Structure formats: structure tokens, C-alpha cells
Image (cartoon, rainbow, N blue to C red):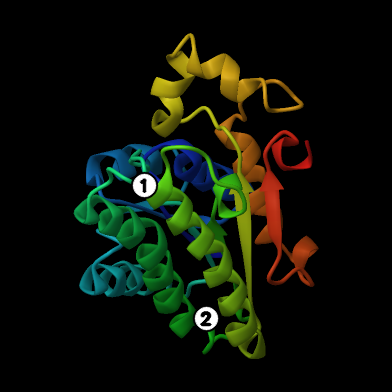
Amino acid sequence: MTVSLVTGAGSGIGAATATALAARGDKVVCVDLDGARAAATAADLDGAIAISADITSEDDSDRMVERTLDQFGRLDVLVACAGIEISGNALDVDVATFRQVVDVNLTGSFLSAQRAARVMRNQDAGGAIVLIGSINSQIALPGATAYCSSKGGVLMLGRALAVDLAPFGIRVNIIGPGVTDTPMSAEMLADPELAPTFLGRIPLRRAADPAEIANAAAFLTSADASYVNGAYLPVDGGWLAG
């Protein structure tokens, strides 16, 4: 039995990832700040449970892992999908907003990974962790100072974790989604001026379906990726290649 914990499982990439992992037979723990949304995702998955948790809280991060162990007795996979995006030009974004974005996207990913790894290191089979970065882990876009900073941090966090945790048989990899059809991107994709600008930069000329990101997470947390560690995998329709 493989037990997988997915943060941000209430919608978007997180919900799609929980669905993909359950489809391959995992017992999935759906975590979201919005407990009702987490429960809605879990309700459609065989044997899944839902937990409401704030990933920026040390106590909540401990609690979601403890609940996982109470329910299933082990933890094999973590996919840290929870994240936020708040736009703001570098000259105008306030410090509180900058800290909020970094706290959720970077510190939250760290806490989730650290707490999961503390369990995985005591298991014979180790474990697999996937962090959700962005194409903005490598390139900057206008008006996204806080977001780009946080996702750049996620990339280096994942690489540092990959080095530190490898002796315990724990693999850590990072996915860099491009434009994806999620609630976070809904406003931009509905904008008749912005949408063509962004989609026009993608060689495939379309946004990703969340399931396409989830499929990459499923691969990286599978035995087929047993020698993949510290990798950054763009799933961006070719944006970074163009």
C-alpha cells in the first residue's frame, strides 16, 4: 500500500494530483486550507481522507502528518501543491503581501516536506517528494515579484532537500508548470487581451489541463523514476524552450 499526502488538494493541480494518485491505487490524504474543498476531492476517491490545514503553521503541518499515520500507519509520497499568486510590481508590492506569498509557497513547501521526510526516513522504502514550482522558478514576468521570488526559492529548496534526504532513500523533485487551466489562472485566461499574449508564448498554443501536471507528479513519485532525484521538470507546453 502506498500512502500519498497532497497539499492544495481542494482544487486545480492539487485536486488533479490526488485523483491521479488514487487512480493508480494510492491511499490519498487530501489537505487544503479549505476543509470543505478537500473533503469534496476526497469524496470521489476510494479510501481517501480529507484534512483542513494551514501549511504555513508548524502545528498544522505536524497534525496533518500525524493524522496520516493514525489512519494509514505510513507515509510514502508527498506532493506539495498548495500555493498562492498575488500580483504586484516591485515598486508597489507591500512587504506584508511579499511575506504572505513567500510564506505559503516557500515556507509552506518546506514545512510539508520536512514533516513528511521525518516520517519517511524511518521507513525501509524511504519515500518520494514532489514540490510544485513554476516556469517562474527560472524566468521572471512583469508584476510578479513576490511570486517569482517564492517559486525560485521552491526550485532551490527542492534541490537542497534532494541532497540532504538522499541518504535516507527519499527522492525530491520539482515540477515547473506553465500556464495551467486552474482557478488561480482563470481570470487571466478569461481576459481577451492577456490570454492571447500568454498563450501566444507557448509553442503548443494552449494552457495545460491540471491532469497533465498531475501525470508528471505521478511519474516522479513512481518506481519508474527511482533514479530521478533533484530534477526540475518543466511541464509548460514548450515555453522555456522557445
Q: Position of residue 54 (x, y in %)?
A: 25, 59
Q: Mark 1 and mark 2: span between their CA atoms?
A: 39 Å
Say the numbered circle drawn on residue 120: 2
Is residue 53 visible in the rendered image? The answer is no
Mark 1, secondary structure of its residue: loop
Residue in view at x 23 percent, y 68 percent: 57
Closest to the observer: 57 or 150? 150
- Neighbourhood count class around disc 1 (C-alpha, 10 Å): few under 14, some 14–19, many 20 upward: few
Side of 53 relative to 144 (left or right):
left
Q: Position of residue 206 (x, y in %)?
A: 66, 21
Closest to the observer: 223 or 89? 89
The residue to which callout 1 is attached is: 90
Q: Residue extending furthest front?
A: 91
Residue in view at x 76 percent, y 68 percent: 228
Q: Is residue 196 above or below residue 73?
A: above
Residue in view at x 57 percent, y 32 percent: 179
Q: Quadrant of the C terminus?
A: top right
Closest to the observer: 22 or 217? 217
Name the N-terminal-most of marks 1 and 2: 1
Mark 2, secondary structure of its residue: helix
At label 2, which amino acid type do we have? Met
Is residue 187 visible in the rendered image? The answer is yes
At label 1, which amino acid type do we have? Ala
Q: Quadrant of the N terminus?
A: bottom right
The number of callouts visible is 2
Q: In the picture, residue 144 is in which quadrant?
A: top left
Q: Is residue 7 above or below residue 140?
A: below
